[in-house]
Image (spheres, rainbow, N blue to C red):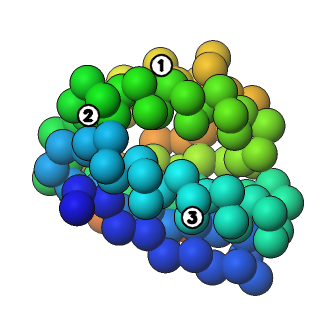
């Protein structure tokens, strides 16, 4: 699986690490985790760490669009931590499609991303 996640219910935080290329099957595991945390906590925050990340296959792109539509009001903040310029660009492109605050951090700045999510 190209995606791993850790729920921190007390902080209303879902930590996600993505590597390789995301597939539709990855979203079949990711979506229930997000929905469950939203049901338990209300609005949540997401730390999305991309390590050796190669994007999405076609099935995952469609799942990501559906995910964004379904949860556009359920996610307060998204901190994206990446290694490449295209990932920073992706964070900027996502902003008009969500009600969430989105901020990009370079690799190695995970603690700064966590601090921003907690503020």
What is the distance, in whole Å, between disc 3 and disc 1 at their CAs? 24 Å
Q: Residue 47, image x and y in percent?
A: 51, 59
Please identify the quarter of the rendering in which residue 99 is found: top right
Mark 1 burial class by Cα count in 10 Å: few <14, some 14-19, many 20+ = few
Is 101 placed left or right of 108 in the picture?
right
Q: Establish if 8 lies above or below 65.
A: below
Q: Residue 6, image x and y in percent?
A: 49, 75
At 36% from the left and 27% from the top, the residue drawn is 61
Mark 3 burial class by Cα count in 10 Å: few <14, some 14-19, many 20+ = some
Q: Establish if 87 lies above or below 82.
A: above
Q: Decide which of tag 1 and tag 2 comes sooner along the chain.
A: 2
Please identify the quarter of the rendering in which residue 117 is found: bottom right
The residue singled out by tag 2 in the image is 56
Residue 33: mark:
3
Residue 93: mark:
1
Q: Can residue 85 be seen?
A: no
Q: Decide which of tag 2 and tag 3 comes sooner along the chain.
A: 3
Residue nearest the viewer, comparing 62 with 9: 62
- For the C terminus, the image quarter is bottom right
């Amino acid at each position: 699986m190209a995606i791993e996640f850790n729920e921190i219910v007390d902080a209303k935080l879902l930590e996600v690490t993505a590597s390789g290329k995301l597939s539709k099957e990855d979203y079949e595991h990711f979506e229930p985790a997000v929905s469950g945390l939203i049901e338990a906590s209300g609005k949540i925050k997401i730390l999305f760490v991309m390590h050796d990340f190669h994007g999405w296959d076609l099935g995952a792109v469609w799942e990501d669009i559906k995910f964004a539509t379904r949860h556009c009001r359920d996610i307060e903040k998204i901190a994206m931590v990446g290694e490449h310029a295209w990932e920073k660009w992706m964070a900027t492109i996502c902003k008009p499609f969500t009600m969430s605050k989105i901020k990009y951090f370079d690799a190695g700045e995970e603690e700064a991303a966590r601090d921003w999510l907690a503020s």
